[in-house]
Amino acid sequence: MTDSNSGGGALEGLRVVEMGQLIAGPFCGQLLGDMGAEIVKLEPPETGDQMRHWGQGDRPSWWRVIARNKYSVAVDLRSAEGQQLARDLIAKADILIENFRPGTLEKWNLDPAELRKTNPGLIVVRVSGYGQTGPYSARAGFGGIGEAMGGWRGIVGYPDLPPARMGVSIGDTLAATYGCLGALAALHHRNKTGEGQIVDSALYEAVLQVMESTVADFSASGTKRRRTGSTLPGIAPSNVYPCKDGEYLIGANQDAVFARLAAAMGRPELASDERYATHRARGARQEELDALIGEWTRTMTIAELEAKMIEASVPAGRVYDAEDMLADPHFAAREALVTVPDAELGEVTMQGVFPKLSATPGSVRRPAPLAVGQDSAEVLERWLGRPA
């Protein structure tokens, strides 16, 4: 079903100018828009954002997700006229999002320091590869480069193969999410003081933030985490195990949970066996334990194994793709997927708005703008009181 929530969301009334491109800046705008903010996206005339052409299949639809809840205004930021129009819109905004290389806004006569003289409460979210300062700040940086520098790529994959990548642009979306978090923190500060500020979100630092104890472990004991395929070293059992008709993920890497798994296997003695009784013991015998569990799981279908895991209260689950999600009743019950009408594609089903707020839920209120600049006249009249 289409998300028809008309309550506006928790951020209703906030005005955001998005000058980002590709993923990092626009995903930050998507998050704020999903929660109710009005997002005005400034796009280059005619060509628009390159994301309009990204996606898989013969009808790419990524744009429909990342540009939902947004208005498109065509602006040539390389021209004096376009720069002035941008300044006028930003003067009416609460938040500005950009993910150009550091120095680009300044080159376009849109220095945040100058913008905040006109609009002191303005919050500027700046997403870049290496941050706005430091010896690498001027370098070009994409999400994959941030994933490598932040430590992610180095530990993904198998030890006898080159580093692998995740199948989605996690570096970009992490930096965008931290940019959004920073914007909300800055809004709280502004509500107390009236003062805006700069939110500096670097791709490599966003990745670094989720790298758990990798740096601390090296600092404390000289230990480096390595590529270990489908497992985390020392965390066992937690893996994808073979069944008669595919694979199934089981996570029983906690003493009480492992005891329930052992009982479900008909091997309750494993939980008190000194080889497997503790977290460290199981981690030391990770491959041995995985092989033992795999011998048991391959005797069943996925459905049979799933029933046992549910009955035993062992965290476990199927490895889904998009088709599985569309067929799953839990996704439907929670409206994890929403269907949005589209003038070109008919309808597009996509992920919903998360997290879910009880009093002011977010929503997909409008589909992505199909034409570059299609909303220019409406926005300029509402925001600036003048025709396009």
Image (cartoon, rainbow, N blue to C red):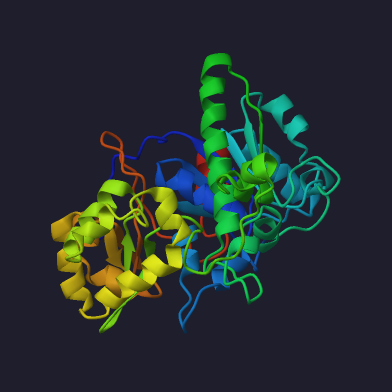
Quadrant for residue 322, please give it.
bottom left
Q: Residue at x 51, y 58 (%)?
A: 233
Does residue 128 lie above or below 110 as drawn?
A: below
Quadrant for residue 359, please give it.
top left
| Whole-percent x, y for residue 232 in the image | 49, 59
Residue 11 left/right relative to 153:
left
| Whole-percent x, y for residue 194 in the image | 58, 18
Q: Residue at x 76, y 30 (%)?
A: 113
Q: Residue at x 57, y 44 (%)?
A: 213
| Whole-percent x, y for residue 358 in the image | 26, 36
Camera sees residue 347? no
Asked whether 307 or 40 is in front, the reply is 307
Q: Residue at x 40, y 36 (%)?
A: 12
Residue 187 left/right relative to 301:
right
Asked whether 326 or 93 is in front, the reply is 326
Camera sees residue 75? yes
Asked whether 82 or 349 is in front, the reply is 349
Does residue 364 lie above or below 179 as drawn?
A: below
Residue 140 left/right relative to 310:
right
Does residue 291 lie above or below 143 as drawn?
A: below
Asked whether 298 or 195 is in front, the reply is 298
Q: Which residue sits furthest top?
A: 193
